[in-house]
Image (tube, coloured by chain):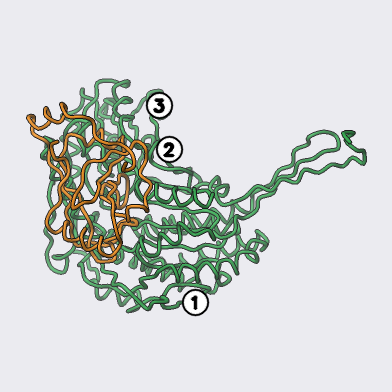
Amino acid sequence: MSKFPSVAEATQAAEVKKSYGNFIGGKFVPSVKGQTFTNPTPITGKPLCEVQRSTAEDIEKALDAAHAAAPGWGSTPVAERANVLNKIADRLEANLERFATLETLDNGKPIRETRAADLPLAIDHFRYFAGAIRAQEGGLSEIDATTVAYHFHEPLGVVGQIIPWNFPLLMATWKLAPAIAAGNAVVLKPAEQTPLSILVFMEVMADLLPPGVVNVVNGFGTEAGKPLASSPRVRKVAFTGETTTGRLILQYASENLIPVTLELGGKSPNVFFEDVMQKDDDFFDKALEGFAMFALNQGEVCTCPSRALVQESIYERFMERAVKRTESIKMGHPLDPSTMMGAQASNDQLEKILSYLDIGKKEGATVRTGGSRAVMEGELKEGFYVKPTIFEGTNRMRVFQEEIFGPVVSVTRFKDEADALRIANDTLYGLGAGVWSRDGNVAYRMGRGIQAGRVWTNCYHLYPAHAAFGGYKQSGIGRENHKMMLDHYQQTKNLLVSYSPKALGFF
Amino acid sequence: MLERIAATPAAVELIEELRAENGPLLFHQSGGCCDGSSPMCYPAREFRVGQRDVLLGQVAGTPVYIGAQQFELWEHTHLTLDVVPGRGGGFSLEAPKGVRFLTRSRVFTDEEYARLKQEPALHRGPPE
């Protein structure tokens, strides 16, 4: 058995404080009303720290700080801004082990993933946008011999960002890095389920950024998220979450006439063509791992491959191997480096997943493996654990159509390519998809045919910076994780200049 | 009309408590990631009900809506609002209380479903 720390030991090692203030104007401050709430760790369900339960007054203070900082930061040379982003990346890298532990404590995900994915990706993301902003060019268009249109990028000013709880640091980074690279000041509200790692991040990098460029206000959506999203003092709102809140945020934005980027989830199909089983080789092994990717991050990923479509000619043989692969997933203590699947992020998340296991069975889907809560021992007893679950059924069942946000995959079969494409696109969403085939032509046609923003082809769940990420259909608006995200945080200034001394001749 | 939406006693109690604090309420069933696939509870005038949103019914005097496309996928199931200990959930009003509304479901029987198909279409759009 591998050696790993208890939650108490890890909490101490990661230097978690008893209580954190909001981070406003470069300082930690208590909320105006002095209220706090307890942040539990889903590993044990026990308290981890106290954070501020903020209200509109705190959002206003953060907006004051951001507005004070925005003009200076926006006019800071890009080389300097890029340097700051690189230093932030270095600082994160130097503290990788601490942040990996914090993220695991806060979210419940296995430390194997925070070490190998969440943190390295966040670090690289800051470096990517440091490079992207340095390399960004404006434009000039020669209209005629004496008229030139110059196009400049300018920051929007102050923007609001609302962060989800599934990858707290990484999702904050996806939004923060392009925003501050582009010269904006930010007021950011972390998810109330996972406020800790972002607060420690602020603590660790406070000396690198001018005060007020990044402000973090904790609290509940209804008390702190709403005043931020509806404020006339932000020039843009970025949100990752679900569709009803997405609509509410668009509604507020319509009142203020500001742009919004939304990432609202999906029900991603993972399509396996018969030729994956042509040989029992590395490629087939990779495809099986691709199937099991529904369990990554306990299924709490917007692009979770939560629908698997398997060609009928290989269905039984494929499923036999896929079930076996799924059953070899090691659940356990999230701080154990050999654990592959940890805790769901909160109790209500656990309850929601269990309610879907229930309706799946009631609708007649067959459970091939899992199908229930996982009862764990020792300090995990009160934590939130679900067995990786495979349902078999048909695509119109609710477990095939709704994002469960848990380690649950619903599998169905298809006849041919046309059938696969029809089923893949029979969904309200279009965020991610996977296509597995040894035939490049089939994979290409499917990839182009699936209405989703990201089609992983012979891979899944890779999130490198420089590959655009965002949704079709009800999955949202905008593209993150790519330099094109800079456009979502910039104005275009056009100077239309005449170099002719002659009047136009109209008057 | 056959009932499509119900609420547990705990949910009714919470709705009444929230109404006493916030005035009239409405629910909108969410979809998508994170806190999605859960019911969101707002002050009635906070959320703009869309022209095509479907009114599933009332619980404890509170209308419950769902998006039109989502309704097509849910219409064969009866829903019950429940409440569980929880944290967060978009801008839903109950979150600061450390509880969360949850939608539980059952499939309508064949007999119920046949009856539903005979009934007039559900109201769509904002309350009249």
Indicate the position of residue A441 as horizontal and vertical percent values.
Answer: 41, 23
Name the one closer to the observer, B112 or A216: B112
Q: Which residue is mark 1?
A: A27
Res A307 → quadrant: top left
Binning the other alpha carbons within 10 Å of mark 1 as few (below 14), some (14 to 19) or many (20 upward) gives some
Instruction: Tell me what residue is drawn at x 35 percent, y 61 percent.
Output: A222
Residue type at mark 1 is: Lys
Q: Residues within 10 Å of mark 3 (few under 14, many from 20)?
A: some
Callout 2: SS: loop
Q: Residue pushed farthest right?
A: A502
Whichever of labels 3 and 1 marks the residue nearer the N terminus, that label is 1
Find the distance from the CA under tag 3 to the CA under tag 2: 11 Å
Q: Are marks 3 and 1 on the same chain?
A: yes
Of the residues shown, which amino acid type is indicated by label 2?
A: Gly
Q: A292 or A215: nearer the eye? A: A215
What residue is pinned by disc 2?
A453
Q: Chain of mark 2?
A: A
Q: Tell me where residue B34 appears, x and y as whole percent.
A: 31, 52
Q: Which mark is residue A462?
A: none
Name the residue that disc number 3 marks.
Answer: A449
Q: Residue A15 lies in what quarter of the image?
A: bottom left
Closer to us: mark 3 or mark 1?
A: 1
The residue tagged with tag 1: helix, strand or loop?
strand
Image quadrant where residue A108 sits = bottom left
Near mark 2 (Cα within 10 A), the count class, few <14, some 14-19 or many ≥20, is: many
- The quarter of the rendered structure image containing the N terminus of chain A is bottom left
Q: Colour of chain A?
A: green
Give the side of residue A385 with respect to residue A15, left or right: left
> Which chain wears orange?
B
Circle 3 sits in a helix, a strand or a loop, which is it? Answer: helix
Residue A464, image x and y in percent? 45, 48
Q: Residue A321, relative to residue A172: is it above or below? A: above
